[in-house]
Image (cartoon, rainbow, N blue to C red):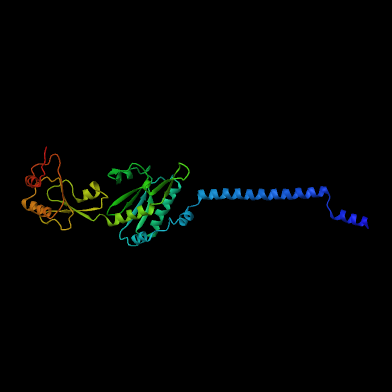
Amino acid sequence: MDNNKQNTNQAVQPSGLDAKKKKRKYSLTAITSTALVIAAIIILNVIMSVLADRVSLNIDLTKDNILSFSDKTDKIISELDMDVRIMSLIPESDDTREVIQIDEILKKYDISSDKITYSKVDTKRNPAVLTRYELDGKALTNDYHIIFESDRMYTVVNVQDLLAKYYHNNQNIILTGALKAEQYFTSAINKVTKGSDIHAYVLSGHNEKYNSEDFQKRIMPGSGVSFKDVSLASDKIPEDADLVIIASPETDYSEQEIAKIDSYMREGGDIKIIVDYNTYGLTNLFAYMREWGVTLED
């Protein structure tokens, strides 16, 4: 009976060698499973890294509400009554996150209205574009600008103004983000469509050196001022005139024309008088200028 119990015990208890084999088997299985999980994570990370380099940032932009316009922007876009051309001069080779964000935002303006068109210009192939536009009275000197233009005027947005810069909490690393793009872009669209509402009249009829087209296209392009010609020989200065320009005439104005200018000035009008170095013989005009304390010297 004791022998049978002993045999039974021997039958159900594994030997020391079998226990070691099973323990090692379990260890190898655990190690293999862990290795597979780590490998899967590494592979997933690699895939996500590759996708991040190739896939558009639409998901991130939507999540951050960057592609969601404010009610004010939606209203301005929906009420546009003239075409707006947006032109980016940012190099195509720049694929930084901020530049991609700016591009996505501008594309949304484009698809939001049939009045808005968005394009990119390579200034290396078309360098003359930099000389056609000014910012703060100076021609553009680099590519990082965005032009907003209508038939009325244009305005230039400096890309640097769009980037909110701040320091990382624990490191001296400057982080940037295209956080103020909508604010600048919508203001630019509103500006070029509403204009400055300044009406300037250029006097004509005395072989003036410049006319309204010269001021509109060459002298003050993009200013938002509307320029028109007016001849005081037959007309008076319009009531909506904010500015009258005498643009280097070759012949003198009559006393009747001077009287019309004086009437405008005494109502609080503004006048700009341009003369060349060889302007002379304008007796009536120069006498009128002296009445206002303005003299012309050699």
Viewport quadrant of the C terminus = top left
* Left or right: 154 as drawn, with respect to 204: right
Residue at (79% x, 47% y) in the render: 20
Residue at (63% x, 48% y) in the render: 38
* Residue 128, position as x, y percentages in the image: 32, 43
All told, the count of numbered labels is: 0
* Left or right: 85 as drawn, with respect to 262: right
Q: Nearer the viewer, residue 166 or 3?
A: 3
Give residue 117's quadrant in the image.
bottom left
* Residue 160, position as x, y percentages in the image: 37, 46
* Left or right: 35 as drawn, with respect to 211: right
Q: Nearer the viewer, residue 68 or 248?
A: 68
Which residue is most to the top?
Answer: 298
Viewport quadrant of the N terminus = bottom right
Q: Nearer the viewer, residue 135 or 184?
A: 184
On screen, residue 74 above or below 54: below
Give residue 282's quadrant in the image.
top left
* Residue 123, position as x, y percentages in the image: 37, 44
* Residue 29, position as x, y percentages in the image: 72, 50
